[in-house]
Image (spheres, rainbow, N blue to C red):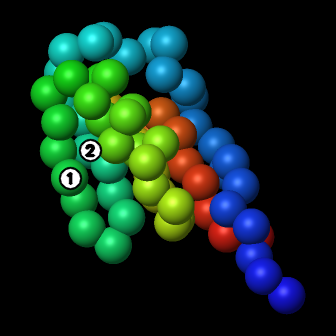
Amino acid sequence: MKKKLKYYGGQGLCYSPNIGKFQVKTTKVKEFDKLREAVDYYNSLHEEKALWDVTTIPELLECHCYF
């Protein structure tokens, strides 16, 4: 049975600034200064992934996992 990538959780994108420090984590970590660039990269991935806003304190914005 093939597992499907599904939304797991996070506070959402609307509470984060457009400019800051963002990380997209998969098997590696990629950093961005602009939220839009981080979201575009995040959406292009087809694997387990998490998008974090680490501007002040780490906040999980969005996460997708296999179920």
Query: What is the three-letter code of the residue carrying label 1?
Result: Lys
Residue found farthest to the front = 44
Label pair 1/2, CB-CB below 8 angstroms? yes
Disc count in the image? 2
Sort mark 2 into few (<14), some (14-19) or many (20+) by Cα contacts within 10 Å.
many
Task: Residue 22 in the image: state x and y as whole percent.
Answer: 25, 35
Horizontal relation, residue 22 to residue 12: left or right: left
| Quadrant (top left/top right/bottom left/bottom right) for the N terminus | bottom right
Out of 57 and 16, give the one closest to the viewer: 16
Q: Residue at x 17, y 36 (%)?
A: 32
Does 29 sit left or right of 50 as displayed? left
The earlier-in-sequence mark between 1 and 2 is 2
Image: 66 above or below 12: below
Q: Circle 2 is placed at which residue position?
A: 23
Residue at coordinates 39% horizontally, 33% vertically from top-left?
39
Type of the residue with mark 2: Gln
User: From this viewpoint, is residue 59 visible?
Assistant: no
Dot 1: element: strand
Q: In terms of image quadrants, where is residue 25?
A: bottom left
Say if 63 sits above or below 19 in the image.
below
**Circle 1: is it few (<14), some (14-19), or many (20+) Cα within 10 Å?**
some
Q: Is residue 36 left or right of residue 32?
A: right
Residue pointed to by mark 1: 30
Q: Is residue 7 above or below residue 35?
A: below
Give residue 44's position: percent from left, percent from top: 43, 48
